[in-house]
Image (cartoon, rainbow, N blue to C red):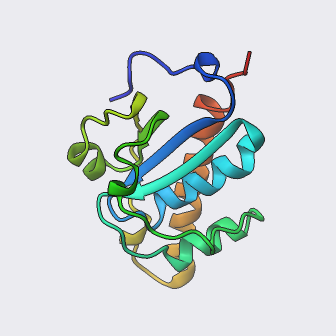
Amino acid sequence: MRASRRWSVAESVGKQRVLFLCTHNSARSQMAEGLLRDLGGDRFEPFSAGTEATQVRPLAIRAMAELGIDISGQESKSLDRYLNQPFDAVITVCDQANEACPVFFGARERLHWSFPDPSEAEGSQEQRLEVYRQVRDAIRERIEEELLTRTLT
């Protein structure tokens, strides 16, 4: 369910702090962090975390590298690291994280973007990579439509 009020980049001065949440912080939230860092330039300060930390998936790294975005240095982080920090937006990118984290008190706005889990893809490595690409592209589209269209004033 989308939030009824969209957050505005003009609500604060400087970079907008955006936290992407997922269950394992291994693919969707990692790709979202890398995409916003690349596409948002100096307007955003993106972060990602999971309800539990694991490792960044190699196919997520590979899918992002195809766009010239290197997320190989990003690490999987637990949500606990960010609980007491302020954010302009906290965006869950998987349904499990949305259910596990219905309220985030450090956020001005709480959004939910539901994307399928690419780590559940089956088939050859190339077939699984194609699923990562599809999810990556869907995340990029949401970032472009809902975050990058805002202007700082």
- Horizontal relation, residue 75 to residue 102: left or right: right
Q: Quadrant of residue 153?
A: top right
The structure residue drawn at horizontal position 72% and vertical position 21%, both measured from the top left corner, is: 151
**Relative side of 143 to 121, left or right:** right
Residue in view at x 36 percent, y 62 percent: 78
- Residue 145 in the image: x percent, y percent? 62, 31
User: Residue visible at 62% across and 23% down?
Assistant: 9
Please tell me how many numbered marks the rendered image carries.
0
The answer, for residue 116, to whether it is visible in the render is no
Q: In which quarter of the image is residue 121?
A: bottom left
| Frontmost residue, 86 versus 145 | 86
> Does 99 sit above or below residue 111?
below
Q: Quadrant of residue 10?
A: top right
Q: Residue furthest bottom?
A: 124
How far across and how far down the image is residue 20, in percent? 46, 48
Q: In this view, does 78 lie above or below 14?
A: below
Q: Is residue 28 something one can see in this rendering? A: yes
Foreground: 109 or 116?
109
Q: Where is residue 144 in the image (x, y as percent from the top left)?
A: 66, 36
- The residue at the far front in this view is 84
Q: Is residue 52 left or right of residue 77?
A: left
- In the rendered view, tell whether residue 56 sits above or below residue 27: below
Q: Which quadrant does the N terminus fall into?
A: top left
